[in-house]
Image (cartoon, rainbow, N blue to C red):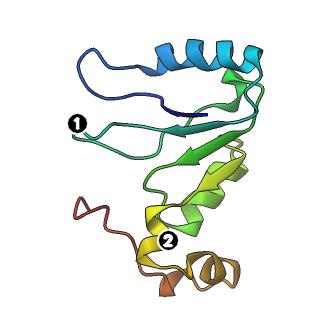
Amino acid sequence: MHISADEIVPNGLTQKDSEKIVRGLAELGIIAIHISVGIFAALNHGYMIWVNSHVKVPVIEVGKIRSPELADKILRAGKADFIAIGRTLLADPDWPKKAQKGRAKEIRSCIACIQG
């Protein structure tokens, strides 16, 4: 299941709301949670560090995780079980190969649709 854990808009979902929703869905049998932050109407988008202790299913983190170093940091800290990189692969389809071979400096970085 994918959820924008904090929509960052007035009257939108907050992380607290999402924790309740995800816990309930985990009890109903979802097998993983794919977490992002922000929606199209929000000014900010990016990854949200969702603490794995909120749910007992694998957590997939997504959103502006542009560097292998950041992905590794999130995984090593136990904040997520998997990292999803969608638009990052549009900027550089060889991102995973370059990361795996220690060639992170050669990665063509996603500019988040000119948002940075």
**Closer-to-camera residue (65/39):** 39
Residue denoted by label 2:
89
Residue denoted by label 1:
41
**Residue 2: numbered disc:** none
Q: Secondary structure at mark 1?
A: loop
**Closer-to-camera residue (100/57):** 57
Mark 2 crowdedness (10 Å alpha carbons): few <14, some 14-19, many ≥20:
some
Q: From the viewer's perspective, is residue 108 above or below residue 37?
A: below
Residue at point 48% right, 14% down? 17
Q: Amino acid at mark 2?
A: Leu
State left or right for residue 56 relative to residue 85. Answer: right
Q: Point out the image quarter for the C terminus.
A: bottom left
Separation of residues labelled 2 and 1 (CA atoms): 24 Å
Q: Point out the image quarter for the N terminus.
A: top right
Q: From the viewer's perspective, is residue 116 above or below residue 77?
A: below
**Closer-to-camera residue (13/30):** 30
Q: From the viewer's perspective, is residue 55 above or below residue 111?
A: above
Which is nearer the N-term, disc 2 or disc 1?
A: 1
Q: Image quadrant of residue 49? A: top right
Residue at point 76% right, 33% down? 31
Q: Image quadrant of residue 91? A: bottom left
State left or right for residue 106 relative to residue 9. Answer: right
Q: Image quadrant of residue 59? A: top right
Q: Amino acid at mark 1?
A: Ala
Q: Position of residue 71 (x, y in %)?
A: 60, 58
Q: Position of residue 107 (x, y in %)?
A: 48, 81
Q: Secondary structure at mark 2?
A: helix
Residue at point 22% right, 36% down? 41
